[in-house]
Image: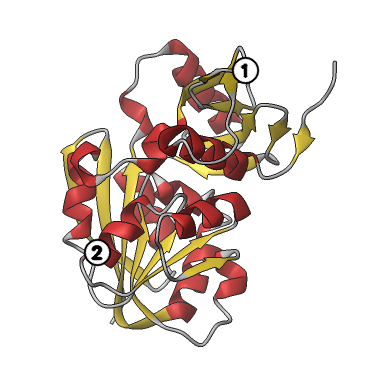
Amino acid sequence: MEQPTIGDAFGEMIRDAYAVRTGIGPRPLAGGRYPRPVIEVIERDDGLINGAPADHYLDEPPDWPPYDHRAMRLCRGRVLDIGVGAGRCALELQRRGIAVTGLDTSLGAIEVARKRGLRDTVRNTVDEFSRAAVRYDTFLLLGNNLGLLESPERAPVLLAALSRLAAPGARIVAQGSDPYGTRDPVHVAYHERNRQRGRLGGQLRLRLRYREIASDWFDYLNCSVAELEGLLAGTGWRLKSIDERDRPYYLAVMEQDT
């Protein structure tokens, strides 16, 4: 069986989703005529495949979940939107007159964010960008991007990079998901498999598939609030508040130790 080409699967998907929504540019067509829905396919390392429409990456505020609106109110000062994607949240902050930078590793995502009007974008990793001289007051990790902590080994490295970019009194506003309320036997078995391998239960090993392209495999962390507190220990960041009104999803605000 042919293996997928490794590349910017997320960026290609976002480009097509934007083209289908706007009617601008080449887009996948059914029968050469009708736009196909753009589907994000996530493959997990136990063989599980999930798919969902990718159009939500372009959603405007009326279509957002409630916790995203509450997260906007927690942003202050200069904001770095990490994993900006198509610019959904950064564009709303920009409309509100807030200085915001959109950071992503995906060239396609950055291109779409700029087409949609996001003025300040950076294509880079957090680690590399942490060498920049700029400082931020808020780091935004929405769209379940608390998952970018990845693992107990990776989390302190990412948090140290944010410390280098942090202005005095900076905060992290992140949306996460507690994975342990599920009764789905496929997920419960995966959590147990992870623990047997010395990993956190919700430590996912994933890759994104879109058409003939796949991303590299990567870790992505769904963790409980208690696990998050453990990951923060000794990093210079502490948990300031938790908003669990939309469980299993939550908003976590972290601030630097004083």
Q: Residue furthest right?
A: 1
Asked if the residue under mark 2 is in contact with the one under mark 1, i.e. CB atoms within 8 Å, the reply is no
Label 1, residues with CA under 10 Å away: few <14, some 14-19, many ≥20: few
Question: Residue placed at 52% from the left, 72% from the top?
Answer: 161
User: Percent x, y for residue 145?
Assistant: 42, 49
Q: Which is nearer the eye, 193 or 15?
A: 15
Left or right: 116 in relation to 9: left
Q: Position of residue 101 (x, y in %)?
A: 42, 69
Pointer 1 residue: 32
Q: Is residue 33 above or below residue 234?
A: above
Q: Position of residue 71 (x, y in %)?
A: 22, 55
Q: Amino acid at mark 2?
A: Arg
- Point out the image quarter for the C terminus: bottom left
Q: Nearer the viewer, mark 1 or mark 2?
A: 1
List the residue tagged with mark 2: 95
Q: Mark 2 or mark 1, which is nearer the start of the sequence?
A: 1
